Amino acid sequence: MERLLEKAETEIIVKKSRFISIAIPCTSLEDIKPIVKSIWELHPNATHVVHAAVIGKKGDLWSMSDDREPKNTAGRPALEVLKGSGVTDILVCIVRYFGGTLLGTGGLVKAYGDSVKEVLPLLKTEPLIERCSFSMLLGYEFYDGIKRLLNQVSATGLEEEFAQGITIKGLIPLTERENLEKGFQSITMGRATLTLS
């Protein structure tokens, strides 16, 4: 699975109706409602704001809404395209401005599905890597060596606190756990504390 890194937007026109697809990073089902509300605020004259979302490490949490389009003609086709994309932690809002011509159920299904297909090539993603968090307490004499080690094990989200000793917290890919433990032991010779969770 890949996860979405940043917002992407595109637009298609189908029989004078505008369909604007906005892909937004989203890591929780609770975040969907406020994001959809913010899209409405950006497009107050839109006819519909349909959404589809795929969330979670396995991409097994879903959400969708037809937003007053006929049942299963909007959110469902958008969600099916999204589920097939291999991207997770993504919310796609499709803003529709009605162009005066009714599309019929088949036309709506195609338009909403195509809207998601159009935005997919624009997505910036990264592989979804399982990570574990770490916390370490060490003396100043080990700082430079530990910083090099953290770089080698692709540590992210680092927080450092300098007091009597140095506390460093962050995340590493699960696959680097053993390398961090061995490197930490080797550098500090057992004179520092490492906690992994």
Image (tube, rainbow, N blue to C red):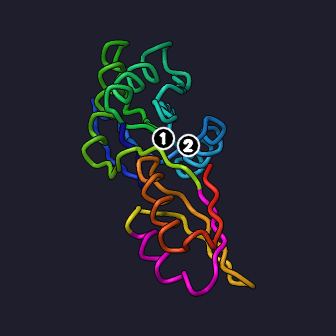
Mark 1–mark 2 CB contact (< 8 Å): yes
Q: Quadrant of residue 77?
A: top left
The local crowd at label 2, few if under 14, some if 14 to 19, many if 20 or more residues have their Cα within 10 Å, is many
Amino acid type, label 2:
Thr
Give me the C-alpha separation between circle 1 and circle 2.
5 Å
Among the two numbered marks 1 and 2 on one chain, the one whose residue lies closer to the N terminus: 2
- Which residue occupies the foreground of this view, 30 or 143? 143
Dividing the image into 4 quarters, which one contains the N terminus?
top left
Q: Secondary structure at mark 1?
A: loop
Residue shown at the point (29%, 21%) measured from the top left: 110
Mark yes or no: residue 22 visible.
no
Towards the viewer: 100 or 119: 119
> Does the stretch in magenta take in 139?
yes
Residue 67 % position (x, y) = 55, 26
Q: Tell me the number on the disc at residue 27.
A: 2
Where residue 35 appears, x then y in whole percent? 59, 45
For the image, the number of numbered tags is 2
What main secondary structure does the magenta stretch of the protein show?
A: helix
Q: From the viewer's perspective, is 86 left or right of 177? A: left
Q: Quadrant of residue 32?
A: top right
- Residue position for label 1: 89
For the point 49% across and 14% down, which residue is it?
A: 70
Task: Residue 132: say if magenta.
Answer: no
> Which stretch did the figure color magenta?
134-151
- For the residue carrying disc 1, how many other residues have a C-alpha within 10 Å: few (<14), some (14-19), or many (20+)? many
Tag 1: amino acid: Asp
**What secondary structure is found at the residue carrying circle 2?**
loop
